[in-house]
Image (tube, rainbow, N blue to C red):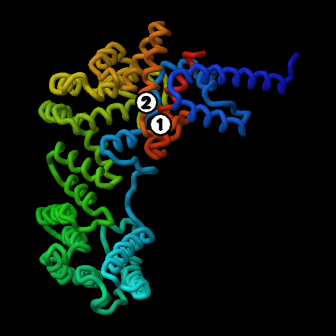
Amino acid sequence: MAGPREKNSNWMVEKLWKTVTYCVALLSMNLRVIPGLAAWFVCSIPSPACGPFFPDTVLDQPQASLGVPPFSYLNGLGKLAGRESPGGSGNDEQSLEVQIPLEVAELQEFWRAAGVAQPEIDARVKHYEAVRKEMLGRVLDVGLMEFSTKADVPLELAEHPLGDGFPGDVADYTEGARLHGLGKTEEARTVWKAILERPSADRRLRSVWAAWMLAKTSADLNECLTWYERVEKEAAGGATDVLGLAGAAKSWRAARLEDPIESIRLFFQAYQQGKDSAARDLRSLVSRLLEQKDPTTLALAAGDPILRSLINLEIQASLEGTLGAPTEPSEVNNIEPSQPPAEWLAVLEAHAPLPLADGSRIAWALYSSGRYSEAQHWLDLSAKDDPMSLWLQAKFDLRSGQLDAANEHLSKAIQLISTEQDWRPLSPTETPRWYSDAPQLQGATQGRMLADAGMLAL
């Protein structure tokens, strides 16, 4: 009778043999699959007790090939916005250690272009850092972009703390901040308004900041929104914005608008401009729009390419919850039978151009909730060259016992997705969706596709 050690050895040999078979099957699909396979194999060697990842999918979850893959909302949003997905929780507030170096780098570039000697630049930087730390060091919270200074105790700074060697708008802005820190906000606002009256070339470094602080210190909502618009106008007109205040201004405006469609547009633009936390606002607004099911609003959204894409993205992301793990489609998937809402499906089919470029998102959500006939219908309305559409079609093929068709569709899906820039397949993970690194989770999605292909090959 074989002992535990021998059983474990036989089990490992069997798993490794399946791994080799899997690799051979996938090599015929696309040569770019090789790096992912090699990485999996190498990473599995130091931990033989765990074994390579992909056979575990078969052994531990026999119905995994019918299940729903992990999905990253942030990765999908980043692709829509044309920017990289942020890691972590999407909190873009800048700490003191981050903000001041950005300001210093901007000033150094200005002085070098003006021909100032390096020793003099170093001396000015040292003085500037001391002044800014005296101001910002009193901010208790990490959200320095939200308020540039706050006096818990009187500032120990002389009047006009920056001398003649500094750009005029920078020196004046800092004086305004000093006044504001002393509680002399109206005097500070007068200084900041004067900055915005300078010629554009003479206010380039601090006009965005001045407009931002005028918005933050305004007691009137309409005036506040006007100053936030000025922040965006100054940035668009060529003023520097090393802190990303233009995107933040869009978020503040979006949060104060009553029109949900316009709010979503502004939050999306803010995210495009680097305001990472706008992603959470987008999810909240889009979810509320779907819950309210107003036919007029939904029809407008269905006819707008960006809004339509954001809603479909949210629907796919909510199919398992931001903290859920991928499971076989069933009633325990924590998704209500009414999702996606029938009202959205109706206006989408009526107003969106077909075939729908991201129709696979709808199809996956319906598949996840067990609404298979509807999922197949939306799959038929989806773009045929979408890897996610081909992958889901392979699952339907598998459910009906058409293994050759499933293999063909899945092979084509891998061929297409492996040419994308973010092709980095990883072992599927059950880490929390929102707080995990978005690019890494995208790799887990790709890894799950390879795992499905491996199961078919075996």
Foreground pick, 370 / 350: 350
- Could you tell me the amino acid type at mark 2? Ile
Residue at image point 71% right, 36% down:
45
- The relative height of residue 336 versus residue 146 in the rendered view (above or below) is above
**Local secondary structure at mark 2:** helix
Mark 1 crowd level (few <14, some 14–19, many ≥20, 10 Å Cα) = some
Residue 330 in the image: state x and y as whole percent: 44, 20
Residue 417 in the image: state x and y as whole percent: 43, 30
> Is the Cβ of the residue at disc 2 closer than 8 Å to that at disc 1?
yes
Residue 251 in the image: state x and y as whole percent: 25, 55
Q: Quadrant of the N terminus?
A: top right
Residue 434 in the image: state x and y as whole percent: 43, 44
For the question of whether residue 183 can be seen, the reply is no
Residue at image point 32% right, 77% down:
113
Q: Which residue is mark 1?
A: 423
- The relative height of residue 452 versus residue 154 in the rendered view (above or below) is above
- The relative height of residue 36 versus residue 215 in the rendered view (above or below) is above
Q: Which residue is mark 2?
A: 417
Residue at image point 63% right, 21% down:
59
Q: Quadrant of residue 313?
A: top left
Q: Quadrant of residue 174?
A: bottom left
Foreground pick, 100 / 73: 100
Residue at image point 54% right, 33% down:
428
Spatial CA span between label 2 and label 1 = 7 Å
Q: Quadrant of the C terminus?
A: top right
